[in-house]
Image (cartoon, rainbow, N blue to C red):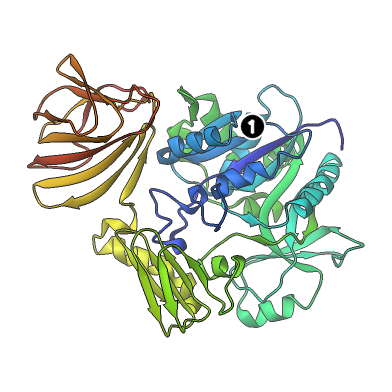
Amino acid sequence: MGDLLIQPIILCGGSGSRLWPLSRESFPKQYLNLINNSKNSLLQETYARLKVLKNIEPPILICNEQHRFLVAEQMREIRVMPKSIILEPIGKNTAAAVAVGAIRSNLHKKDSVLLVLAADHIIKDSKEFIKAVESGYELANLGRLVTFGIVPDSPNTGYGYIESYEALSKENKASSILRFIEKPNIDLAKKLILDKRFSWNSGMFMFKTSTIIEEYKKISPEIIKLCSDSLDKAEKDLDFLRLNKKYFLKCPDISFDKAIMEKSSLGSVIKLDAGWSDIGNWQSLWENEKKDLNGNVIIGKVVEKDTNNCYVRSESRVIACLGLNELIIIENGDSILIAKKSLSQDVKAIVKKLDKEGFIAGKLHQKVYRPWGNYTSIADDERWQVKRIEVKSKSSLSLQMHHHRSEHWIIVKGTALVEIDDKEELFSENESVYIPLGSKHRLSNPGKLKLILIEVQSGSYLGEDDIFRFKDNYGRG
């Protein structure tokens, strides 16, 4: 490979609502460990598979503001210090995100080869993927805009297609791009997969920084100008870079394919046959998992009899299945999904209906992640609520006050340092402390072990917005 470094740009946006109830707006699929027997989330796997490349740079990650601590923590878990974690004030599709990544990569006017990846893809054959990346690197060095075309194994209507000038094969793995085709109907899809010039559009790209910035200036000057302004006026926030909202909101909401690739004369496609999937729904996850003799994927506390070709996953409770066929069953503490496997694409419609009818489970998990740890809602009523709280070693919640509720903490594991109205005291397992309404207080974990406690809230209003912060280690107001 050449002298230019490869700069990964990992796009972490998207809500993944077709994988509800595991994937929700508060914790989308890219941050989940969805593959059985894998220790990493999809985001972590996205960067981990690149580590064999000798000329790889730390990643630039672009994510939603509300997921910033998830991204930072997941990178810390795999011992990666990102070059930058850029926060979008609102999702504006991939054209704006790629432009931001390219401009940030070009900060010191040093050319590199950008490798744009989505954070939520599965690639089973990492060796084949790396070979394709190395081929893409060579083409990108020649000034091409490279995308990766997936060898189709079915007439899938959920993907866009790429038509290349030449048929892609073992002997000829790359070609110039003739055109892009929107997601086809089933009749057209059946015709397309018979022609080796057609491949699925993976949404992964490679190009030199200088090349893509010039293409933006020529084809989509408004996007590159607004993204440049949003970066020029960005604010540093701890380890994050907050894009300027005023300029970023003006960016067109358009995909990178439509804004650049479909209009550029520099497009090339490289054949990729590496067990790729974007895990767009539960059926695609079932297809990618190892199955038992009856075609089932069984995860968690599941007992089955006379059950075939099902995906059954329990996160907490026991699921018993008898005489079932072709179903998706997902239990996730506060919610259960039961659906025909063939209707997996329609789960998104159920999530919209949940939201419309006021069910918070459509967007929010029972378990909520914070930079200091997490909490899980156990039970609640109109004037009280019970939570299980975990605080990481050497971490602290903000110094805060509540106007409408009091709290009672019972320590069940570890040691808690509790500050109430400027007085500090240590509490150990089986000890408890009461926080009166209106008291200035802070909870910290001074120990090396995880701190676990049960919190009982009581009061006239129990919403998470009843927090007035005096001091916070994580820059939250």
Q: Is residue 266 shown to the viewer in this render?
A: no
Residue that label 1 marks: 103
Q: Residue at x 18, y 46 (%)?
A: 386
Is residue 225 found left or right of 374 in the rendered image?
right
* Mark 1 neighbour density, 10 Å: few (under 14) some (14–19) many (20 or more): some
Q: Residue at x 59, y 34 (%)?
A: 225
- Farthest residue, direction right: 171
| Amino acid at circle 1 | Ile
Query: Residue 116: where, in percent of width, then height?
Result: 66, 44
- Quadrant (top left, top right, bottom left, bottom right) of the N terminus: top right
Query: Residue 458: where, in percent of width, then height?
Result: 10, 41
Task: Tell which of 261 and 449 is nearer to you.
Answer: 449
Q: Is residue 172 shown to the viewer in this render?
A: yes
Q: Residue at x 86, y 68 (%)?
A: 167
Task: Tell which of 239 and 122 is nearer to you.
Answer: 122
Task: Tell which of 25 and 244 is nearer to you.
Answer: 25
- Farthest residue, direction top: 422
Is residue 159 found left or right of 281 in the rendered image?
right
The local secondary structure at tag 1 comes to helix
Query: Residue 352: where, in percent of width, then height?
Result: 35, 64
Above/below status of 86 relative to 303: above
Query: Residue 251: where, in percent of width, then height?
Result: 51, 42
